[in-house]
Image: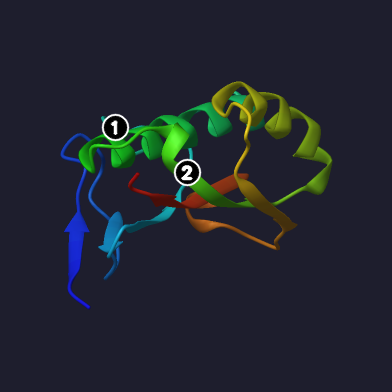
Amino acid sequence: MTRKIVTAPDLTPPVGPFAQGVWAGDLLYASGQVGQDPVTGAMVTGGIEAETRQAFENLRRVLAAAGLGFEHVIKTHVFLVDISDFAAMNAIYGGIFAAPFPARTTVEVAKLALGARVEIDFVARRT
């Protein structure tokens, strides 16, 4: 299967050997995004809410670069440094997606890159 790389031109380039997104057939796999400001490269301030909003904005840019929107997302993974942030993250998440909602896994992790409190990735399908 041929893979096609997706790069959002208005995002900070990855700091490691990975792509922002990869098409595999009709599926788009997005690498995890944190609350990194694409202009400054720094993490946004304002806690879990600000970081979650920015992570979704960064994911929106990956989707847009692939010609898709959040309605194409079929699976998400959410990584939280503190599971007590779940309700705040979930409130923002619920404003991003509409029914039928994508499948989701949410886990608490010890640490995330750049000192992030949340990281989100997804799988989307071209319809």
Name the quadrant of the N terminus. Answer: bottom left
In terms of image quadrants, where is residue 26? bottom left
- Mark 1 or 2 closer to N-term? 1
Left or right side of 53 for 10: left
> Callout 1, which amino acid?
Thr
The quadrant in which the C terminus is found is: top left
The x, y position of residue 19, in whole percent, is 26, 61
Amino acid at the residue labelled 2:
Val
For label 1, the crowd category at 10 Å Cα-Cα, with few meaning under 14, some 14 to 19 and many 20 or more, is: few
Across and down, in percent, residue 54 comes to 46, 30
Left or right, 57 with respect to 85, comes to: left
Q: Mark 2 points at which residue?
A: 73
Q: Which of marks 1 and 2 is in front?
A: 2
Can see residue 19? Answer: no
For the residues labelled 1 and 2, the Cα–Cα distance comes to 28 Å
Count numbered badges in the picture. Answer: 2
Residue drawn where x is 72% and y is 32% of the image: 90
Q: Which of 67 and 86 is in front in this view?
A: 67
Image mark for residue 40 = 1
